[in-house]
Image (spheres, helix red, strand yellow):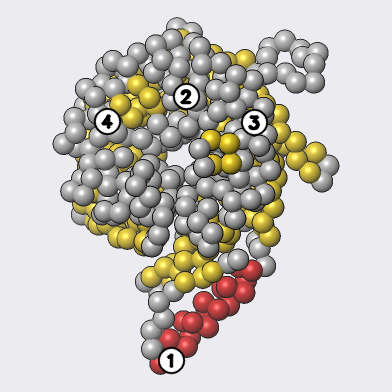
């Protein structure tokens, strides 16, 4: 079921606005929801992050657990005739290679996949890894990719527990990320630079609590080399903050751009920037089942203005970074809202100085999946792709959650 919501005015303005909303709802109903893959546990279980696409139209992602050792996987989803086939590229063993994967993967300049694990590794505090096909020819149908650990976090001043978000590369081939804790205890932003055949970590900024703590999200890198992210906690109502880490002289400096003024939910997702330099983000991931919402930060004369675009009314809200299209629409997922309480996919459309909210799909908790936590991937044709933590027809079960998760598609 697709629902479109907007507050309509009165008289002719009300009629015109509501007519547009009704038309939008009819158009939304023409969309088609399809499950591309249902996880079974052996091929992965509980994908937290969203997907990454290559130029050939294949999708890559991760699962938190499942796989050969039940410690998480990296997978590829490829077209096969009129269907799709999933290939497990790597199963983590929770040894030096890392384990339990919250973040997704990105492509590096060398065409390899890069990502992080939340736990395991040499000192059991997570790793940064690279995956690439084996350099030797494969003689079996299932060929695992080769993993290289770029950095194994020690839990000390180099950080620990890299968070939910993806890594990001700069033009020089340096890699950036954040850890939820470590450093002085409140988390940090780091850089990994290729050096003499290995990688060297540099801590760019170490949070102290007053400037936010637990930077759990991925980072956004702008053309000037500034990094943007969010903290899970901090700010006047402890819903988190949006921060900027910028080159300054021979070092780096941090600036809090805004507290996230959604007292009902903390922040896990990062931010995305539009062509005018505005930042968009979400709030709503915490253990209390509070909803949160979608916000925009607008720059003006060296400061930033917080604008709440939409606030959810019930259950847990968005947990990842929103996605923008060329028309300025904002897409995302919400973990526990929707008609059945198992989450939804939504779109926010700018209209007359406000925003129209459209619920694109309500997950039922059955074969279509349950609890979408990752970001939405948008292709050039306007198709949406994503994952759910649970649901589907797999037999995985933990506490009250059943199903191993799915990969889904919404066609306009």
Give whichever of 83, 189 is nearer the camera: 83
Which residue lies under the disc numbered 2? 117
Task: Report the residue that reaches farthest toward the left.
Answer: 210
The residue carrying mark 1 is: 12
Of the numbered discs 1 and 3, the one sitting upstream in the chain is 1
- Residue 133 at x, y = what percent? 66, 19
Residue 13 at x, y percent in the picture: 42, 87
**Sequence-first disc among 4 and 3:** 3
Badge 1 element: helix
Relative to 244, is 287 on the left or the right?
Answer: right
The vertical placement of 199 against 185, above or below, is: above
> In the rendered structure, which disc, 2 or 1, sits on the residue that comes first in sequence?
1
User: Which residue has dot 3 on it?
Assistant: 41
Label 3: which secondary element: loop
Which quarter of the figure has residue 72?
Answer: top right
> Quick one: SS at disc 4?
strand
Looking at marks 2 and 3 on the same chain, the residue that comes earlier in the sequence is marked by 3
Badge 4 crowding class, 10 Å Cα cut-off, few under 14, some 14 to 19, many 20 or more, is some
Q: Nearer the viewer, mark 2 or mark 3?
A: 3
- Quadrant of the rendered image containing residue 63: top right
Which residue is the extreme one toward the right? 81
Location of mark 4 (residue):
247
Task: Please tell me whether mark 1 or mark 3 is closer to you in this view.
Answer: 3
Closer to the camera, 180 or 56?
A: 180
Which residue shows up at 41% across the image and 55% down it? Answer: 315
């Amino acid at each position: 079921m697709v629902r479109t919501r907007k507050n309509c005015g009165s008289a002719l303005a009300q009629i015109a606005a509501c007519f547009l909303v009704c038309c939008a709802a009819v158009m939304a109903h023409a969309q088609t929801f399809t499950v591309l893959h249902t996880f079974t546990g052996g091929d992965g279980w509980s994908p937290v992050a969203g997907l990454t696409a290559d130029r050939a139209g294949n999708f890559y992602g991760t699962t938190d657990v499942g796989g050969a050792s039940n410690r998480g996987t990296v997978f590829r989803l490829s077209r096969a005739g009129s269907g799709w086939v999933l290939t497990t590229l790597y199963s983590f063993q929770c040894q030096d290679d890392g384990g339990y994967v919250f973040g997704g993967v990105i492509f590096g300049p060398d065409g390899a996949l890069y990502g992080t694990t939340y736990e395991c590794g040499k000192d059991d505090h997570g790793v940064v890894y690279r995956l690439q096909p084996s350099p030797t020819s494969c003689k079996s149908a299932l060929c695992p990719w080769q993993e290289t650990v770029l950095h194994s976090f020690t839990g000390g001043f180099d950080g620990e527990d890299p968070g939910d978000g993806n890594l990001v590369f700069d033009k020089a081939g340096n890699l950036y990320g954040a850890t939820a804790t470590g450093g002085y205890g409140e988390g940090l932003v780091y850089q990994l630079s290729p050096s003499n055949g290995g990688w060297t970590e540099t801590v760019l900024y170490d949070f102290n609590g007053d400037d936010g703590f637990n930077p759990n999200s991925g980072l956004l890198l702008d053309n000037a080399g500034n990094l943007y992210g969010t903290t899970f906690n901090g700010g006047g109502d402890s819903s988190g903050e949006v921060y900027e880490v910028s080159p300054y002289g021979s070092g780096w400096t941090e600036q809090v751009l805004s507290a996230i003024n959604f007292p009902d939910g903390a922040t896990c997702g990062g931010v995305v920037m539009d062509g005018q330099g505005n930042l968009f983000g979400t709030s709503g991931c915490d253990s209390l089942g509070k909803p949160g919402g979608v916000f925009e930060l607008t720059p003006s004369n060296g400061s930033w203005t917080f604008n709440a675009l939409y606030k959810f009314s019930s259950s847990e809200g968005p947990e990842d970074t929103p996605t923008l299209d060329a028309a300025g629409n904002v897409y995302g997922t919400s973990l526990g809202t929707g008609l059945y309480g198992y989450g939804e996919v939504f779109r926010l459309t700018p209209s007359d100085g406000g925003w129209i909210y459209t619920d694109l799909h309500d997950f039922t908790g059955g074969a279509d999946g349950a609890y979408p936590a990752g970001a939405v991937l948008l292709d050039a044709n306007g198709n949406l792709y994503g994952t759910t933590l649970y649901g589907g027809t797999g037999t995985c079960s933990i506490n009250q959650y059943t199903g191993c998760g799915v990969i889904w598609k919404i066609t306009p």
